[in-house]
Image: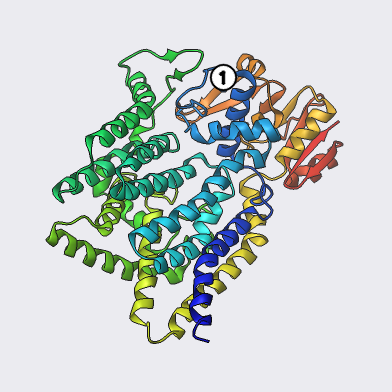
Amino acid sequence: MTLAGPSWRARAERWLPLGLILLGVLVRLAAFGAVPAGFNQDEAFAGYEAYSLLTYGVDSWGYPFPCYFISWGSGMNVLESYLAIPFVALLGPTEAAVRLPQLLCACLSMPVFYDLLRRMVSRRAALIGLGLLAISPWHILLSRWGLESNLAPAFLLFGFYFLVRALEDSRFLLASAAAYGVSLYAYAITWAVVPLTLCGWGAYLLLSGRRFPLRHLLPAVGLLFLLALPLLLFLLVNLNVIDEIVTPWFSAPKLSAMRGGELSWRNLFSAHSYWDLGNVIFLQRDFLPWNAMEGFGMFYPISLPFQLLGAVRLVRGAAGALRARRVCWECLVLLGALCAVLIGLMFYDVGINRINALHFYTLIFITVGVDELVRLCRKARVVPALVAAAYACCFLAFAGVYFTSYNDEIALYFRQGVGQAVAFVKQQGFDQVAVDDSVYYSQILFYDQTPHEVYAASVDYAGGSASFLDVDGFGRYTFGIDYGALEEDTAYLIPAGRAGELTAAGYQTAVFDGYAVAWQ
């Protein structure tokens, strides 16, 4: 009997992390590509850019391999599209192919997060954090659709992980620089978050007496600079310092408008920004259903006490380390979170995806809080069991809603049925198709797989702001329908709710989930 206990615990320590990772992978894989239903306009544009680069060697605006897409007019991040190219090549331009980079990065984040916590805190905290990440609504949601900015948390996590490893072995600095450099292409907000965070950490390490050998530091700095250089050139182009750069293998295009005005230091003094930030941090919501589900939040409402307890423990640990002038992980986490908050507050509208540099730090706070409760209640073993049971119930309830009623709800936002409707249009060979205003032109582009030369020659930009250009039409498609003046020689792509109206007017209709095609 004396040997059974340690042997059982050793097996559990070895297999439990794998079991939690497997749970996380399974919940992210289940019905992948079909849940969430439909296809968001941003992931559709990212998918078309990947398809166009793969097929024609240029993006939708005709630029060879740009460091930043023009797309809507004011630009879009490129990393999602570049990572999707091999999957589009293998699977064709499908929803699943475009969403695979998010899935793979999310699944890789789980073992990385586990090992990060194991090295910083303890094996027990690592298991807690891995379990929380595996069932986190925020992380499950982002892993299953292709919003390009949602790649940023994974690469910021990878960069932080290798930085922590570099404190043990400075050779990992190069990997950290690579991850942070790649993150710059995931989300433009990282252009501010990454330098601010790295400068903050650098100053802290210097003041604490921790210095990296120059033979490892200089190559890491050089690599980060080289990775950032295309974007620096892109900024110079769009600040009218230099002309556009267009080569067969790289482009730095001129946008129709820069959205730099969305980020302003004046918002640091705006009550609205702090209100939005409080909603994200404490209520875990931004009222956008694709970022957080009502009632479940990002990490479940029961996490707030643990988040506060973890913050207290981190501040206490950081204060002790600062007095002793030694390097501690608590200071790194707090500094990283502070930098993410400062940049987030510079938005007037602070949303979950806009401040996504913060969320892994928040999860560390929650993990440390749960770990602290377990430590405080080590003689009352029922407490950890109750916490685990509470999270398990939350997760089961979340999964039950996510794969059923939530998917029906998100199908309306993501225009489920447009893909089938476009496929029907192509099959029938309609020459002229008018598309309802509720459909984004990027969704038609992706599903139609409009050849680049056709799109470039026929696209008609009209109306809208310079930041988000409206399109009147391209190829066989025009956008906007006057339902009071329908034309006999035109097919109509309409919401399914209007199919009866056109049927009564003598049109044939074919209904595909939320959308229909009507023709005479």
Frontmost residue, 386 versus 36: 386
Amino acid at the residue labelled 1 = Val
Q: In the picture provided, is 488 more to the left or to the right than 227?
A: right
| Residue 426 visible in the displayed image | yes
Percent coordinates x, y for residue 10 in the rendering: 50, 71
Q: Compared with residue 275, is residue 10 higher up or lower down, i.e. above or below?
A: below
Residue placed under numbered mark 1 in the picture: 58
Q: Residue at x 54, y 20 (%)?
A: 61
Q: Residue at x 63, y 58 (%)?
A: 26
Q: Residue at x 34, y 73 (%)?
A: 372
Percent coordinates x, y for residue 480 in the rendering: 65, 31
Q: In the picture provided, is 269 more to the left or to the right than 418?
A: left
Q: Quadrant of residue 444?
A: top right
Q: Quadrant of residue 301?
A: bottom left
Q: Residue at x 40, y 67 (%)?
A: 125
| Residue 481 visible in the displayed image | no
Percent coordinates x, y for residue 43 in the rendering: 58, 38
